[in-house]
Image (cartoon, rainbow, N blue to C red):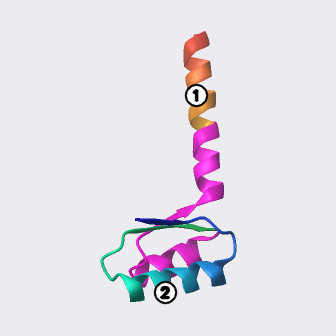
């Protein structure tokens, strides 16, 4: 498995391509910043593409809801 967490989408694409060339069966998890880029990467069989901002927002919402529930 290779985790590609660089914020530069060009670098993500290049590293993912090189990794697939060297090992077609490698599992990839990549960072992205937009729905369009995520769709592109997943369409190119890059693997799991994660939007950092979305994951952060979901984690913050979960935390807030857990705290509110604990106080109720």
Quadrant containing the N terminus in the rendered view: bottom left
Percent position (x, y) of residue 51?
58, 62
Main SS of the magenta part reads helix
Q: Residue most toward the front? A: 22
Residue occupying the point 48% across, 86% down: 17
> Label 1, label 2: how many angstroms apart (C-alpha)?
41 Å
Return the residue at label 1: 65
Q: Which image quadrant is residue 23 in?
A: bottom left
Percent position (x, y) of residue 34?
62, 71
Return the residue at label 2: 18
Percent position (x, y) of residue 2?
46, 67
Q: Which image quadrant is residue 8 in?
A: bottom right
Q: Residue most toward the right? A: 8
Residue occupying the point 56% across, 24% down: 66
Residue 49 tag number: none
Front label number (1 vs 2): 2
Quadrant containing the C terminus in the rendered view: top right
Q: Give the range drawn in magenta.
A: 33-60
| Rendered position, 28 above or below 59 | below
């Amino acid at each position: 498995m290779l985790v590609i967490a660089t914020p530069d989408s060009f670098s993500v694409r290049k590293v993912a391509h090189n990794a697939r060339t060297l090992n077609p069966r490698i599992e990839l998890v990549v960072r992205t910043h937009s729905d369009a880029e995520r769709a592109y990467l997943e369409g190119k069989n890059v693997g799991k593409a994660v939007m950092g901002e979305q994951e952060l927002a979901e984690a913050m919402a979960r935390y807030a809801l857990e705290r509110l529930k604990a106080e109720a």
